Amino acid sequence: MIRDKSAKKTDRKSGKKAGKEPAELPKGVIAVAPPSFRRERALIKRGVWPVAGCDEAGRGPLAGPVVAAAVILDPKRIPKGIDDSKRLTVERREELFEEICATSSFAVAFASPARIDRDNILRASLWALARAVRALPEMPKHVFVDGRDKIDAPCDCDAVIGGDGLVVSIAAASIIAKVTRDRLMSALALDCPGYGFESHKGYAVPEHREALDRLGPSIHHRRFFAPVIAARLKHFPDTVEVEPDLFTVDGEIDSEISVTI
């Protein structure tokens, strides 16, 4: 048998065995570390538990609600592969959704298009996030929320910019929120055919803008988003609406939406 003697040689400068170098990433590709449980574990060591993560899906679309989720992971049963929902394929999100639901405590809340129209998208999103936390089976002692803004929760709260890529509890919440909203938009497509909600989930892609221009707004569209305003003026030119004051709001709006997930 002939042995490859070069495999045993060492580099004189480094002292390391010669051989194949680790495969390098393609030029322009940056390795991204997955979110970790480090921040949650630090709180657990201080006796702070439960710890939740929360995130939302659907701030950018022209139609449908904002969906917020809050998740308390079991430290001993964290599903492998949890990541920011935007980095995952549809199939992997669905798999992790089922695993997270089976091993964690979670809650989901919705801010309807009516609330978004009334309060503005930011305030409606923060309201839904706070409601999801309050709906958890057990109130957390601490919550991590994705983004710049803290929420009105009855516990300590840290806002983490880019949190869905850093904190695994937030990443888990992003998966729950995204899958729940995608399923809801597919259900709304049956109620309002022709808009393509089942494919683009309400986002302002060219196909959605074309359908909006052709059919006019549905009851699921957000009235004060610019493309929806343009479509409403085209199809209902005699309709005059005054945009509500987004900072002085009175009364309550029903924001409940039922969906089987």
Image (tube, rainbow, N blue to C red):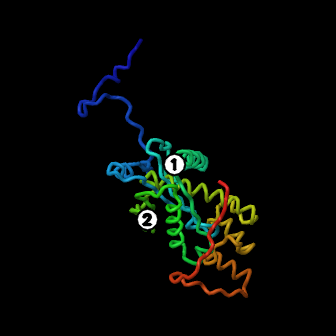
Which image quarter is the C terminus in?
Answer: bottom right
Q: Position of residue 155 (x, y in %)?
A: 41, 62
Q: Residue 183 got which mark?
A: none
Q: Looking at this view, is 140 or 30 the one in front?
A: 140
Q: Looking at this view, is 43 or 96 the one in front?
A: 43
| Residue at x 43%, y 59% (from the top left corner) | 143
Q: Tell me: residue 26, above or below residue 204.
A: above
* Mark 1: amino acid: Ser
* Mark 2: amino acid: Pro
Among all residues in the image, which is located at the extreme left?
13
Label 2 SS:
loop
Q: Tell me: residue 67, above or below residue 165.
A: below
| Residue at x 73%, y 88% (from the top left corner) | 238
Q: Mark 1 Cα within 10 Å, few/some/many (few <14, many 20+)?
A: some
The residue indicated by pointer 2 is 154
From the viewer's perspective, tell me whether residue 193 is left or right of residue 50: right
Q: Position of residue 114 (x, y in %)?
A: 62, 74
Q: CA distance from mark 1 to mark 2?
A: 20 Å
Q: Mark 2 Cα within 10 Å, few/some/many (few <14, many 20+)?
A: some
Q: Position of residue 45 (x, y in %)?
A: 33, 48
Among all residues in the image, which is located at the extreme top?
1
Q: Position of residue 188 (x, y in %)?
A: 70, 63
The residue indicated by pointer 1 is 104
Q: Quadrant of residue 12?
A: top left
Which of marks 2 and 1 precedes in the sequence?
A: 1
